[in-house]
Amino acid sequence: MADFNAILEKTKAFSKKPPTEVYLEFYGLYKQFQEGDINIEKPADAEGAAKYDAWLSRKGLSVEDAKAAYVVLYEKYNPIYG
């Protein structure tokens, strides 16, 4: 999936930094397709807990579905932050 890898790189290189809630949408999908369902305890710190919740919200998505959702998210936000 070469196109997907290109999208990953383009997302990392957004010219404008997305707000935290947008970052967390990408983060949850990224963790889901990289590692599968969440397999850690919820961290006590606020940032770690937010990342945990973002990943947990994607529980049950297959790798393919998580990647497809990531592409849709990229297409939504690239005009704004790309």
Image (cartoon, helix red, strand yellow):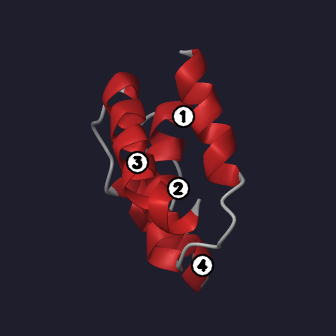
Q: What residue did someone put label 3 on?
A: 75
Task: Residue at 56%, 84% (x, y): give it.
Answer: 46
Which numbered tag is attached to residue 35? 1
Q: Label 2: which residue? A: 27
Farthest front residue? 79
Q: Which residue is pictured at 52% across the width and 44% down the height?
A: 30
**Which percent across, then down, holds residue 11?**
61, 50
Q: Is residue 47 above or below residue 53?
A: below
Give the CA separation, mark 4 to mark 1: 19 Å
Quarter of the picture holding the C terminus = bottom right
> What amino acid is found at the position of numbered circle 3 in the picture?
Glu
Give the residue displayed 53% in from the left and 15% down from the top. 1
Which label's residue is closer to the chain start, 3 or 2? 2
Kindly identify the amino acid type of the residue bearing the numbered disc 1: Glu
CA gap, disc 3 and disc 2: 16 Å
Q: Position of residue 79 (x, y in %)?
A: 47, 60
Which residue is painted at 42% across and 32% down in the image? 67
N-term-proximal mark, 3 vs 1:
1
